[in-house]
């Protein structure tokens, strides 16, 4: 295999690495490396086995508690802790494989520096080992120069493996306080599951509330074991299904949830059409919806201005206006004289001399022509099925029902739609996501028992703004902003201004790196620091991503193995696995099927010593900040000061900003800050977690803002305003839209209060490209968090599944193409990339228009364990080209049109 040309020097290094560990060299200023295993020739007289309780970070939900078996300092076995808050004794496959993660010979074992100036995924970097101090000195020197010149010249990209490190991950204070605007989560491009949730719920991860739900409509969504939690949650979902909750799964492939419930096969990438038809059926055929909810808890009755880009407003108070149908006049939205059911939802009214409509009328107009028959033609879901689903949703929603929890009466709406990645990762994915939320609003099933909910521990997310509407999550918490004010010249290299409501930046760096002038970016990055991220695993042609990253003069990657980013880096640094680290991590107490149970703080003292004497990454970055000169001192440009604010430290626990701390000390102070002076690493170790559970009623966000105290946006005013701002900005700056007229045309098409449908570029790629890709996660691999796609144990267990590493085709499709089980095929994408050959697996569990791939987690670095080549290179079929981008979110299209060619 060509990709192994570069492994010669790596093997040499591997040997060196193991030797390094075994002879216990001093590792710079960061303590001693200890022998990993006892020397073979050393007689082990006694085996000491200890069982240590600890936290698991095998996934980014990272909240199960495990019992770690350690023999003479070596982690040998992991089992679920029966007292674990979430997992209650269970241990998922990723956690069970932790020892292989720790002792994987492909781990990086020492900091390394490149000697070969030529960079490439297949080019030997010519690594030489350096000490931690040498690495620190060189990085610090460069950062000092950049900070003095222009801090924006540092690009910092974290992925999920960073999340439980509070300085380098979870909000990224290191890079933010350094002062660069170029700090964005690398994860986003295929994780466009947040935008509509942020606006409608005020929080950014939506999910199913299954405590009360009787009918769950999953659209491109999983809720079971694939959803990444080993714990009681999965059992809970299964218990619910077994005890009668209907799980109806609209998906081009039949997964675990569908096999336990009902599968509604859909043609890939047509979800918007399905949802439009569903809304049409509810509004025009059934004619029943939760009228109280729409009138009192959504912006449905708000009168829109004729341009549709703002509410009509009272000239004196500037408050949005509604039409009181009984009094037959316009009133401000919170005028208590309007009866609950007297808000007009339909029709035309004269206000301030203009003919205007309530927002709801726009919805009626938008879905008027989208009959079930129309939907069937596009989605292949039979019209009768669409009608049945609409009827079942309305019937099961029990509109008007209430439930009393903890003495509070809450609406009970045990039916909802749960849309996720399969629905949202398309050209029109955010439009589809919005329509799914609109249907939930019609059901009254938002933030109430049985409804669509969010993962958060802060019910205050439903707080209304001055218009009476839920403040989008970003504004409420002032982080993870999906909304970017126009500013020109642009300051961030991913130019979020160009897609103002986006959540999915990672890949946009590729655009600007390749052609900065086109995007009016007037500087180039000088340095990149990545932490457990890989732009290559987000989709898009690896050759293009490689070319772009090569433009960055100096790259540092903090990682686990020689992944793609490492191959392009100048210095690589080695991470700790969670068992080698002291961890204290704030998390939501989310469970699948039960969004909002509270908050937890999980963690442990290290279970085993760091194998290679490596420091905790946060300590490395704290010291780096000190060297660069922004650790101590007062002001938000000083890290300790910023951490005092971020963690809301009480005066008695505040960090003294004249001295330095280890992360261990900082975390212990934080524990005390939250849980009182008795809290310590020791008390944490006894239990494995601290939890703050919400009272049961408050697990439903409705409880904190009940009745008429807040409204969810029904009309998507955010994207309409975003478009308006974009156009005004471009005009003021006097520049053309860098993403071109076609992108703008689609932007204008989808950026509406309620979207319309039209064929997307994956539907018009030509007759040869007659299938669309469908990729789905599998339990073994959480992308590569915790090195799982390179973990031999996980790969081995995953490949006991006959679907892995194959191209899944429906029997009708296979017959049409003259293919049989086991035939080898290449897959070509509409964007000109090709993968394969892979064996075909013929199965009824995928739609005839789909080319299915399980996992698809292939990696592209020559220096990773060759076993990563067993994974299908699905992401290579995707593109970062404009036509492959969701115009509203900036996320990538996940279902390219493809052609199958027999090998
Ligand atoms: N085919 C396919 N692609 C997908 C998805 C999919 O379902 N299928 N999902 C998409 C989604 S929703 C998301 S959110 C993103 C997630 O994307 P990320 O969170 O960025 O995860 P990875 O891309 O796996 O990047 C992890 C990188 O960190 C390195 N690494 C592994 N373990 C460790 C560790 O312990 N420490 C450190 N420092 N580094 C480590 C790995 O070598 C890898 O290169 O991926 C997206 N890509
Ligand atoms: N084990 C494991 N758990 C994870 C993760 C992981 O990588 N591994 N990742 C976590 C993250 S970051 C995220 S964002 C969530 C995501 O969780 P989900 O969004 O639920 O992602 P998947 O499990 O990949 O499920 C997507 C579903 O969409 C279907 N699908 C694909 N294309 C289409 C389409 O065009 N239309 C429709 N209707 N369906 C389609 C797939 O067949 C699949 O069943 O999962 C989280 N949990
Ligand atoms: S679900 Fe995540 S935290 Fe829980 S055991 Fe599995 S990998 Fe660990
Ligand atoms: Mo994600």
Image (cartoon, rainbow, N blue to C red):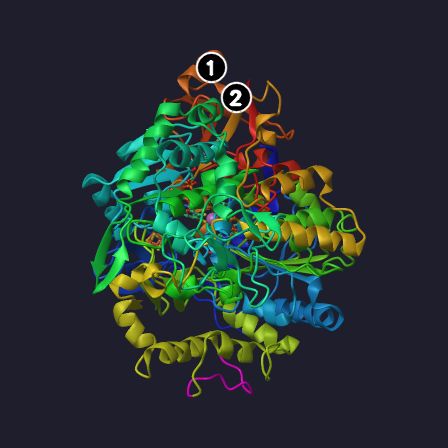
Q: Marks 2 and 1: CB-CB under 8 Å? A: yes
* Rendered position, 761 above or below 694: above
Q: What span is in magenta? A: 652-661
Give the x, y percent position of residue 213: 27, 46
How would you classify the magenta stretch by its main secondary structure?
A: loop
In percent of width and height, residue 501 lies at 59, 52
Identify the secondary structure beneath mark 2: strand
Q: Nearer the viewer, residue 760 or 529?
A: 760
Which residue is painted at 51% across and 72% down in the image?
Answer: 619
Q: Position of residue 641 (x, y in %)?
A: 54, 80
> Compared to 826, does 147 lie above or below?
below
Q: Is residue 504 visible?
A: no
- Residue under label 2, please give it: 825
Q: Residue furthest right?
A: 734
Judge the density around disc 2: few (<14), some (14-19), many (≥20) Cα neighbours within 10 Å.
many
Q: Can you tell which mark lies on residue 769?
A: none
Mark 1 crowdedness (10 Å alpha carbons): few <14, some 14-19, many ≥20: many
Q: Is residue 601 visible?
A: yes
Q: Is residue 766 on the magenta stretch?
A: no
Q: Nearer the viewer, residue 610 or 479?
A: 479
Q: Secondary structure at mark 1?
A: loop
In which quadrant of the rendered view does residue 405 lie? bottom left
Residue 87 placement (x, y as % from top left): 27, 55
Outermost residue, front side: 327
Task: Specify the quadrant that holds the C terminus.
Answer: top right
> Image height check: is 850 above or below 76?
above
The residue indicated by pointer 1 is 819
In the image, 744 versus 654, the foreground residue is 744
Mark 2–mark 1 Cα distance, whole angstroms, equals: 9 Å
Q: Quadrant of the N terminus?
A: top right
């Amino acid at each position: 295999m060509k990709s192994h040309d570069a492994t010669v020097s790596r093997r040499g290094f591997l040997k060196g690495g193991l030797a390094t560990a075994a002879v216990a060299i001093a590792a710079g200023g960061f303590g001693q490396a200890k022998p990993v295993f006892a020397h073979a020739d050393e007689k082990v007289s006694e085996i000491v086995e200890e069982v240590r309780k600890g936290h698991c970070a095998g996934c980014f939900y990272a909240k199960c508690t495990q019992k770690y078996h350690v023999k003479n300092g070596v982690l040998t076995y992991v089992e679920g802790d029966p007292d674990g808050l979430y997992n209650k004794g269970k241990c998922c496959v990723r956690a069970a494989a932790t020892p292989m993660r720790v002792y994987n010979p492909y781990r990086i074992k020492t900091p390394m520096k490149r000697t070969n100036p030529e960079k490439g995924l297949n080019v030997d970097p010519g690594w030489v080992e350096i000490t931690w101090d040498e690495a620190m000195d060189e990085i610090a020197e460069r950062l000092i120069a950049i900070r003095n010149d222009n801090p924006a010249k540092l690009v910092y990209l974290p992925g999920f493996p960073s999340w439980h490190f509070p300085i380098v991950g979870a909000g990224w204070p290191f890079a933010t306080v350094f002062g660069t605007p170029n700090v964005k989560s690398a994860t986003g491009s295929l994780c466009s599951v947040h935008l509509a949730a942020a606006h409608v719920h005020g929080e950014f991860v939506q999910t199913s509330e299954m405590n009360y739900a009787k009918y769950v409509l999953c659209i491109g969504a999983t809720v079971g074991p694939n959803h990444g939690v080993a714990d009681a949650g999965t059992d809970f979902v299964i218990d619910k299904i077994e005890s009668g909750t209907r799980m109806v799964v609209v998906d081009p492939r039949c997964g675990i949830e569908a096999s336990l419930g009902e599968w509604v096969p859909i043609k890939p990438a047509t979800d918007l059409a399905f949802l439009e038809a569903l809304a049409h059926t509810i509004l025009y055929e059934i004619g029943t919806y939760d009228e109280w909810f729409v009138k009192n808890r959504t912006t449905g009755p708000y009168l829109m201005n004729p341009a549709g880009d703002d509410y009509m407003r009272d000239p004196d108070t500037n408050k949005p206006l509604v039409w009181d149908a009984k009094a037959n006049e316009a009133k401000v939205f919170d005028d208590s004289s309007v009866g609950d059911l007297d808000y007009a939802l339909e029709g035309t009214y004269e206000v301030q001399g203009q003919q205007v409509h309530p927002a709801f009328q726009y919805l009626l107009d938008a879905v008027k022509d989208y009959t079930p028959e129309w939907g069937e033609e596009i989605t292949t879901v039979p019209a009768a099925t669409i009608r049945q689903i609409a009827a079942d949703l309305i019937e099961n929603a029990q509109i008007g029902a209430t439930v009393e929890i903890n003495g509070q009466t809450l609406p009970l709406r045990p039916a909802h739609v749960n849309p996720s990645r399969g629905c949202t990762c398309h050209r029109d994915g955010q439009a589809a996501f919005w329509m799914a939320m609109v249907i939930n609003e019609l059901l009254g099933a938002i933030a109430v028992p049985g409804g669509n909910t969010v993962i958060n521990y802060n019910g205050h997310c439903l707080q209304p703004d001055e218009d009476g509407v839920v403040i989008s999550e970003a504004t409420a918490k002032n982080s993870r902003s999906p909304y970017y004010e126009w500013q020109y010249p642009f300051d961030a290299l991913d130019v979020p201004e160009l897609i103002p409501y986006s959540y999915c930046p990672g890949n946009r760096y590729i655009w600007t790196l390749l052609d900065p002038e086109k995007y009016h970016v007037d500087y180039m990055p000088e340095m990149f620091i990545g932490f457990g991220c890989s732009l290559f695993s987000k989709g898009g042609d690896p050759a293009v991503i490689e070319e772009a990253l090569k433009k960055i003069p100096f790259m540092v990657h903090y990682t686990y193995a020689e992944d793609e980013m490492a191959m392009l880096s100048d210095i690589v640094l080695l991470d700790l696995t969670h068992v080698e680290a002291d961890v204290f991590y704030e998390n939501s107490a989310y469970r699948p099927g039960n969004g909002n149970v509270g908050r937890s703080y999980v963690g442990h003292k290290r279970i085993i010593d760091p194998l290679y004497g490596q420091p905790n990454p946060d300590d490395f970055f704290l010291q780096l900040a000190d060297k660069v000169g922004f650790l101590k001192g007062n002001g938000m440009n000083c890290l300790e000061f910023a951490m005092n604010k971020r963690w809301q430290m009480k005066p008695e626990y505040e960090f003294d900003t004249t001295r330095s701390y280890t992360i261990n000390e900082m975390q212990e102070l934080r524990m005390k800050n939250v849980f009182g002076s008795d809290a310590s690493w020791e008390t944490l170790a006894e239990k494995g977690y601290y939890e703050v559970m919400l009272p049961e009623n408050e697990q439903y966000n409705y409880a904190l803002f009940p009745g008429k105290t807040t409204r969810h946006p029904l009309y998507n005013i955010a994207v309409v305003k975003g478009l308006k701002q974009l156009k005004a900005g471009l005009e003021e700056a006097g520049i053309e839209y860098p993403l071109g007229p076609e992108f703008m045309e689609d932007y204008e098409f989808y950026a509406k209060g309620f979207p319309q449908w039209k064929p997307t570029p994956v539907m018009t790629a030509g007759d040869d490209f007659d299938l669309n890709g469908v990729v789905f996660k599998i339990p073994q691999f959480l992308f590569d968090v915790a090195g799982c796609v390179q973990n031999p144990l996980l790969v081995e267990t995953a490949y006991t599944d006959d679907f892995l590493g194959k191209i899944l085709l429906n029997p009708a499709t296979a017959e049409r193409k003259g293919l049989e089980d086991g035939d080898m095929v290449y897959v070509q994408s509409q964007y000109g990339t090709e993968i394969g050959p892979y064996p075909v697996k013929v199965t009824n569990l995928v739609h005839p228009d789909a080319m299915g791939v399980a996992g698809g987690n292939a990696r592209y670095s020559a220096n990773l364990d060759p076993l990563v080549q067993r994974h299908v290179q699905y992401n290579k079929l995707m593109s970062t080209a404009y036509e492959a981008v969701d115009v509203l979110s900036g996320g990538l299209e996940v279902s390219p049109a493809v052609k199958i060619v027999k090998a």
